[in-house]
Amino acid sequence: MKLSDKFIDSKICLICGSNELYHFTAQAYDAPPISLVDITECKDCTFAWQYPLNHTEQQSIEIFETAYTDKGKTQSGYFIPEQKLKIAKLELDFISSLPTENKTLLDIGAGAGIFAEAAAENGWSVTAVDPALDINQLNNKPGINAIKGTTGQIHEGQLFDIVTLWDVIEHVTAPQELISHASKFLKKGGWLVIETGNYKSSDRVNGGKKHWIYQNDHRWYFAPSSVQYLLESSGFSEFIHSEKVLRPDWTGSVNYAGPSCSNLLKSIIKNPFSLFTHLNTHANLTKAKEWEMAGIGIFTIAARVC
C-alpha cells in the first residue's frame, strides 16, 4: 500500500500491515493548548499518523508563509532566522560530507531560504523550491534559483548531485510519491537527503502526549527504519545516517541506554497520584532501549541508488 493520505483511515498499519492499532489524542505543539491532534499508532512497528487531518494542504501553505514572514516573533522559535542559520550550517556540514561529482543542489521545501543561501555562499549551485518561499530573501542572490511554487517549474531534464528534504516529509500528503518524484531530479550517483522527527526516540516517549512532535501540520510520524523502508521501496540501496541531531543545542548519543529506576522512584514520590503514567512511561522507555537510533530525536538520512 502506498503511503498517502488517501489511506489514512486504514484499519491496518501503512508500513508493516499490522492491524494492532492504538488511537489517542495528543496536544498540538504548534497551536494553543486547547488544540488537539488525533493519532493512530501501530503497536507492532510504532509507525504513526494523524487522522483525521486538522489542516488541508493549502491551509498548511498559508500557515508556513505567515511563519516565514513572522520570523518566529509570535510562532515557534524554529522560525527565528538566527536559529535557522545555525541549523543550516550543521545541515551543510552533513551534505558536504557526501561524495558528489559536483556541487549542484535542489532544496525542496526551502522555507525561508536560509539553508539555500548558506549553501550558495559555500559554493553550491542551488535551486530552492517552496510554495511558501520567502522569495524576497533570495532574489538576486548569486548561485540561487528561487522558485515560489513547485518542482514542476524546474527546467525539464535538470539534474542535481543532491536533493534535500529538510523537515518536509512529515508535512506532505503523499510521502512515498514525494520520494519517487524527488529521485527523478538526481544525477546518477546523486543523494536524496531527508530529515524529520524520530517517533521511535526516548525523547518522544519521555515527552508523552505533549511532545513537540505532535503538531497540526505533522501528518506522519517516522523513524529511521520507516523512512529507509520507503526509500528502499523507491529503489534506493545505499544509506548514510547522521550520527547526531543537526541542531546546535543537541548533546547526546545515537543509542539510548534505557530508563533509570532511581528517576522512576523520584517521579513517583514527587507525584504519586500519577503512578500509572510513571510506570507506563518507564515500560515504554525500556522498550525504546531496543530501538535503533533511539537517542536521536531528529534524524537525517542520505540515500542513493548503487
Image: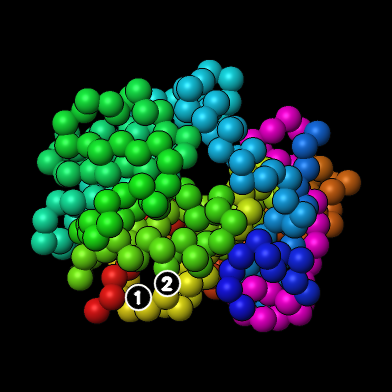
The reply to whether discs 2 and 1 touch (Cβ–Cβ < 8 Å) is yes
Above or below 219: residue 287: below
Residue of label 2: 231
Q: Is residue 21 magenta?
A: yes
- How far is disc 2 from disc 1 in space, using C-alphas? 5 Å
Residue 188: % across, % down: 20, 70
Residue at 56% of width from left, 38% of height from top? 61
Q: Amino acid at mark 2?
A: Leu
Q: Nearer the viewer, residue 219 or 245?
A: 219
Residue stretch rendered in magenta on the structure: 12-33
Q: Residues within 10 Å of mark 1 (few under 14, many from 20)?
A: many
Residue 121 percent location from the top left of the image: 17, 34
As helix, strand or loop, the secondary structure at mark 2 comes to helix
Q: What residue is drawn where x is 88% and y is 46%?
A: 273
Foreground of the two, 219 or 277: 219
Q: Residue at x 24, y 60 (%)?
A: 157
Q: Amino acid at mark 1?
A: Phe
Q: Main secondary structure of the magenta part?
A: loop
Q: Which quarter of the rendered picture does the C terminus lie within?
A: bottom left
The residue at which mark 1 appears reads as 236
Q: Quadrant of the N terminus?
A: bottom right
* 133 shown above or below 191: above
- Direction top: furthest residue: 73
Residue 299 visible in the displayed image: yes
